[in-house]
Structures are given as structure tokens and as C-alpha cells.
Image (cartoon, rainbow, N blue to C red):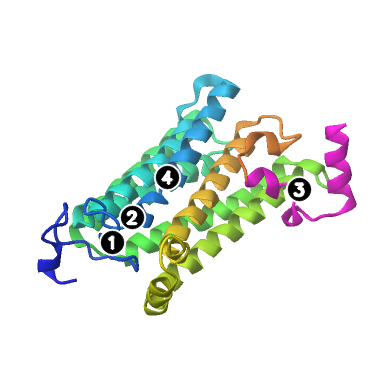
Amino acid sequence: MDRNNYADCFWGYPTSKANFCEADYAISRYIGEFINSLSNVIYVVYGIYGLHQLRQKGNKNGDPLRTLSYWGLIAVGVCSVVFHVSLKYHTQMMDDLSMHFATTPVLHRVLTVNSTHRDSLVIGTVLGALLAFLLTFHMMTDELIVHSASFVSTVTVIGVQTIRLVNTRTQPGSISRLQMWGIVRFGAVIFNVGYWFWLADQWACGFFTKARDAIGLPWAFVLELHGWWHICTGIGAYIFIAVVDLLVSGEDMADPRQSVAWPASWAATSIFAGRGPSVEAGVRGKQA
């Protein structure tokens, strides 16, 4: 669409540098990318669920760091909705930077597991300063290399530290360890599946556009792959936030399924955990 074709669109001509495969304003003149906007509800739903679970548990010691990660997840959903609805440059900046709002609190938690209050405060200050520098640098230069590299690095550190925490905070050969591994493996897999959806949406846009035109609505919505990226990464991000919170909080991990939402609760006893006799017997024993 050229600039004249956006005259009746509520937000006008898109100014964002990123514009995904979904056709602009195809469903409503008020929404730039309908499915890419709607699918962000996954972040908000899981963020609210996580906050609700903390409230149900009493949030030991009233630790605000336990809630911050879930608020960050909600921020990702809200900022991404605003971007995909308006397709404006400044809202794209909000969407880009919101990812760090979700990952930085989790990074702090895995880096300060056994730290004193003073060390935790120092590390938090350093991470906050680095985040402020990254946000400022990204907004001033509109570069993607440092932004992407820092995000990937953060996710990698969180993943490595999560593996270490599972191995050190659960008993070898225990049912809880097997279930935690099932949840973590599933989280890693679904996050990577989402990444491949994102790549396919970029690389094979022409093919999927023709396929959607041939199928027609509403089934064409299924082929909006950037929307699936939101769903997969929303689930994956929630899983790692919930797992880290459970491992770091020191709460009872006898049955991790009770502390996580579906599909993480399903993954705890699925093939991702290993459908061995020990897992199945342990689950039956808890249900008896």
C-alpha cells in the first residue's frame, strides 16, 4: 500500500522500520495488524496469572522482586499491542525495549541466588545502569546489533543459570527434578519454535500471503506466523519466570505442577520429563 491508501486508517501511514507479514489494516481501520495485536494477550494473561499465584502463596516477605518479572511480562504484551496497533516508530521503540523489562529482573534473580542483601543491591544497581544505557543507546541510534546481542546474552545466562539451579536445588533422581526438567525442556523448545515462526514470517512472507489469500478468513489467521511467535515466546517466557521464581524462593517443590499454569503443568509429566516408570509411579503416588 502506498501513502494514499492509508488516508482512511486511524493511525495513518506506518513509520515503524519493522512491518511484519500480516496485511496492514486488513480487519479494522483502527488496528494496523489485527492478529499480531490480539496474540499479545498471552503475555498479559500469564503475567496476571503469575501475580495471582504469588498472592495466593502470600508472597513470602513481600519481596517486590518476585512480582517485578511478571509485571515485566505484562509490559511486553501491552507495549507490543500498542506497536502492532499503530505501526509507529516510537511505539516500535516501546516494543523493542519492553523485552528487557521482562528479562532484566529474572537475570537479577538468577545472579543473586545466594547473595547478601548488599551484594544483591549492588548487582541490581549495575544491571539498572546497564539497562538505562542500553535503552538510551537504542533510542538514540536505532541500532539492532547491540539490542539483539544483549537480549540473546541475557536469555542465555538465564537459561544456563536455570539449569544449574535445577541441579542444585532438587534431589538427584527425585520426581520433582524430573518434573522440573520436563517444564524447562518444554519451555526451551517452545521458545525456539517461536523463533522459527518469526524467521518463517520474514523469509517466506510471499508464500504465506498467497496461502492466506487462497484459504480465506477465518482459517487464514492460522498462517499469521508472527502471532504464533507471540504465543510461543509468551508461554516460554512465563515458564522460565515461574521456574526461576520457584527455584529461588525456596518454596516446597514436591510437586512443581501446582505452581505453574498449563501447558507447563502438562509438560512436567509429559515426554519432556521422560515417560519412565519413576515419573508415572511418582505421579500416581501423589494422586493416591
Query: Which mark is on residue 41?
Result: 4
Real-space Cα separation, disc 2 to disc 1, in angstroms: 8 Å
**Res 114 → quadrant:** top right
Real-space Cα separation, disc 3 to disc 4, in angstroms: 27 Å
Query: Which mark is on residue 34?
Result: 2
Mark 3 or mark 2: name the one nearer the start of the chain: 2
Which is more toward the observer, 110 or 245? 245
Mark 3 or mark 1: name the one nearer the start of the chain: 1
User: Which residue is painted at 43% across and 34% down in the image?
Assistant: 68
Q: Which residue is mark 1?
A: 26
Circle 2/circle 1 CB separation < 8 Å: yes
Which is more toward the observer, 228 or 191? 228
Mark 3 or mark 4: name the one nearer the start of the chain: 4
Mark 4 or mark 2: name the one nearer the start of the chain: 2
Q: Residues within 10 Å of mark 4 (few under 14, many from 20)?
A: many
Q: Main secondary structure of the magenta part?
A: helix
User: Which residue is painted at 49% across and 29% down in the image?
Assistant: 117
Queried whether the magenta region covers residue 287, the answer comes back as yes
Q: Which residue is mark 3?
A: 269
SS at mark 2 in the image:
helix
Mark in front: 2 vs 1: 1
